[in-house]
Image (cartoon, rainbow, N blue to C red):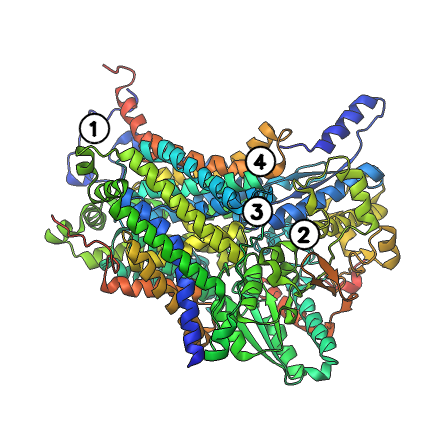
Amino acid sequence: MLYREAGQFKASYKADQQIFPIRQDRIAIGLILAFFYLVVPFIADQYWLQAIIIPVLIFSLAAIGLNILTGYAGQLSLGSAAFMAVGAFGAYNFMLRVPGMPILAAFVLGGLCAAAVGILFGLPSLRIKGFYLAVATLAAQFFIVWALTKFGWFSNNSSSGVITAQKVEILGYTFASPRSKYLITLVVVTLLALAAKNMARSTVGRAWMAVRDMDVAAEVIGIRLMRTKLMAFAMSSFYCGVAGALYAYTYLGTVEPEGFNLDLSFRILFMIIIGGVGTVLGSFLGAAFIVLLPIGLDNLLPVLFGNVLPTGITSNLQLIVFGGLIIFFLIVEPHGLARLWQIGKEKLRLWPFPH
Amino acid sequence: MNFFFEVLIGGLLSGVMYALVALGFVLIYKASGVFNFAQGAMVFFAALTFVSIMELGVPFWPAFALALASMVVLAVVTERVVLRPLVNQPQITLFMATIGLGFLIEGLAQGMWGAAVHGLEIGIVDEPIAWTMDNWGIGVSTFDLFAAGVSAVLVTVLAVFFNKTRVGRALRAVADDHQAALAIGIPLQSIWRIVWAVAGFVALVAGVMWGARNGVQFALTFVALKALPVLIIGGFESVAGAIVGGLIIGASEKIGEVYVGPLVGGGIEGWFAYMVALLFLLVRPEGLFGEKHIDRV
Amino acid sequence: MKLTKTALIGLGIAGALGASPVLAADQYVGMPSYRVGPYAAGGSGIFGGMIDYFQMINARDGGVNGVKLTWEECETEYNNARGVECYERMKKNGPTGNTVFHPLSTGITYSVIDRATADRIPVISVGYGRTDASDGRVFPYIFPLITNYWSQNTVKIKFIGMKEGGMDKLKGKKIVNLYHDSAYGKETIPVLDVQAKMYGFTVTHLAVAHPGNEQQSQWLQIRQIKPDWVILRGWGVMNPTALKTAAKVGFPRNKVLGVWWSGAEEDVIPAGSAATGYIAAGFNVSGTNYPVMKDIQKYVVAKGKSNMEDKSRVGSAYYNRGVVHGILTVEAIRNAQEKFGKGKSITGEQMRWGIENLDLDDKKIKALGATGFLPPLHVSCSNHEGSGLVKFQRWDGKQWKVITDWIQSDQKIVRPMVEESAAKYAKEKGLKLRDCSKEG
């Protein structure tokens, strides 16, 4: 009853192809955005903002990036963290070396650096597929982290290869408080998420999906394979790069190349698998799940077992439960949390008269 | 020139150690199409179980048998809890499930046996043989030769197992075509159990060898990363490919580090193998011994 | 949130007494521990030692001037993002918030520098973390106490000089610096280069890719170079592998000199007999033959309350390092209480003062029962390192044997480099230096 699109007629192609074709969706998105822009900054305390919401947003962005590549274009990648590193170090160097560089421009340029590197490492995808490609993207992962550690120029010759993000300043206003950092992160993430949603329904997005479903067939119907695949790599890396820049500037403040290790790449991959491959919504749900799950376990398990088990065991139990839950989720809902939402929508459509 | 040969031989022998780990990946991929990322965790689990049982005062072979038994139990449980419910899912889902499985096994191993590191002496010294040193000026470690011997035996045993036994033939049938294998009455699930158990055995051997070399500790899980480029070069489906790939990766990695490394600042071993593998792939996209796939529209 | 046993007991006692008008004050320390993953051996040892020391202080002295120590653990898995979450989660806990943060990970240290400075919570990083934070003018809340990497490195060269029969004998010697290819590993390269020029030895830097479980090519190169000494700057599995591979190529282990993160039992036991004769630096020593360790044995371990699952690790290098962390924390709290009120819980800001004015001379260390266990320490506004002393230990196949007394580092080399690096940081961040002549 509440969620019924009957009666919403589309009189033009434009209306039919808009990002959110259903009115209720538009309202829901509007409400969610309003909640995050107008309510969250006032109700969330510093802990929630700095330790949970900001990282969830940033990881969502990285997950969207990976989703573009894996979910939409069907190319498995295990190097997302490295592209985040390129974005972070790129933005840092633009801020450092170009006087008066606006911070948002530095984020974009950092993302573009990542995109360029992404194209480079995307080239093998023209010939390699599946797990062979996945392992090949590991080359990007290890090589980039190595290069950032090895060549002092990237970190302005700091003896340990660590960079410290400059102040985030726009038009003389310094984003120092957690709330302001949250807002700037939110703005960037919202814009890019909408852009991703938009891209998915455009020519490029449909070409990606065609390539994902079967690249030979896509080529036959006239999609230029090379351009489409490289475009996916570039776009995906751009998103990861911007996420990396945010990671350095609005979240951690100081980052080292090893922070962007294979572990982080896997975490991002988990996010899209748990959240739902090929959906933007799933990227957010997955990121929230993967960030919150270990924290939740860390809070919960000691309460349950703290007096019975030694701390070493509870820590290991966390890992076991984390691994177990991932398997459980894959078994119960292989299409991810976003699929649950879809099922919910189907139900809502009929509710309250299911027959 | 002696130095070059020394590096080359050292590299080839290291490559054998990589191949030992890669074998486990190949077995599972061959029979069930699962890219088992938990293989590194299995190596760690097997070695830690083995060494912990030994430290309780159990002699070598009984401890080995007990550790093997634990790997078989692990295989059976994995098949029942992870593989069976996920049958017919896309490969990437299974891949992710094995990463989850990896976390689970790591937590299990450290939870059961503690976080302490262990030394493991199997009675083979890791020192250069005096004879080769004196005559050729090339140092070859006894332990490395032993490891090469173990791998050779292991590969032979596996080859015989695959080619000559009933179960082995069934395994190959499953690898060729699940549906057809099922149709002629091969029980898929018990085949998977066997394959995972055999992979557990390979993990145990690899774990003991690597453990004797660097100690039994969490870092054993990282040896999986050394095995991946080997897999690409050798192909995911080929036992022989794992060995040949291992040799190629081992040798090129060492030669790269010694001769190319100094030009760019060293420490290139982490990615050099992957780059070599990548170049190989550009020429042969399915690895040296991989099965060629023909895409049909 | 997890309440520790002591806190529960403390509450129980306070509840039982009832008559006392105020609850006993607590001093809360949040611990971002890591007990799983590749570095679990270090995490469980060091945090175990620190917790056991706190338990001992609570049991023996009833806390610090009657203020019970309480603590809480938060699992980080040695992961920066998790570490930041732990920091944020724990910073407001306890009556006065988190007193002090021991990240025990260089990455997490970097990640919390800005936050801790803004939140006024001091960060202590003993023997790791940001070397240039030794300049307290730029980093008021960061304390890389005792000895930083650069100081340690000058001591190593001094030690080599002693072994060779004088610093002038270093001329023409060859030293290889075998380092873990990471932020941590690279850190000492500039100092070594400066010293190489100064003393006329040649130094070759060889990187080992993470995790370092394969070093054949590096050691073959070392055999080609035929160095007089190899400095091992390893981490985790890289250490036993280095010693094993050294044996494999026939390089004498008594010419291998390790950093303190290469100098625990966990680093040599996996290498078996290949480790015998290997020498490592340390700002603390192994062993239980110290009054402070005997007290821990008596009040904690013997009563079955030890945090260690494996009791045989009590007295190991990591465990004792944890005890050193405990001593520094407790003494800084005591120091702060002297100024801001005995028997009261102190805040992070007061703790900062307590650490910055920490002065542990020989007499105080003797009173703590820790003579020879940790070096004397004198922290000041400009010097957040405080000591710069290092001892060397040799692994005899069974245990670490101390082979030198405390050796002083060469601050003439280190200090200008620290100041230069800190000044660069201050400039990038647009920070103003504190004027130390005006600080109390």
Q: Residue at x 58, y 53 (%)?
A: B119
Q: Amino acid at mark 4?
A: Thr
Asked whether disc 4 touches disc 3, contact meaning CB atoms under 8 Å apart, the reply is no
Q: Is residue A3 left or right of residue C187?
A: left
Position of residue C54 measured from the top left corner of the image (x, y, whole percent):
75, 42
Q: Residues within 10 Å of mark 3 (few under 14, many from 20)?
A: many
In the image: residue B63, left or right of residue C303: left
Chain of the residue under label 4 = A
The answer for how far apart the CA atoms under marks 4 and 3 are is: 17 Å
Task: Establish whether labels 2 and 4 are both on one chain.
Answer: no
Element type at marker 4? helix
Q: CA distance from mark 2 to mark 4?
A: 21 Å
Dot 2: what SS? helix
Quadrant position of residue C33: top right
Q: Chain of mark 2?
A: C
Which of discs 1 and 4 lies nearer the camera? The answer is: 4
Mark 3 is on which residue type?
Answer: Gly
Label ID, residue A314: 4
Under mark 2, the amino acid is Tyr
Q: Determine which residue is flagged by label 2.
A: C318
**Spatial CA span between label 1 and label 4:** 53 Å
Q: How far is mark 3 from mark 2, CA to CA?
A: 20 Å
> Which is nearer the N-term, disc 1 or disc 4?
1
Q: Which circle, 1 or 2, is nearer the viewer?
A: 2
Q: Which residue is mark 3?
A: C83
Residue C127 appears in the picture as rendered: yes
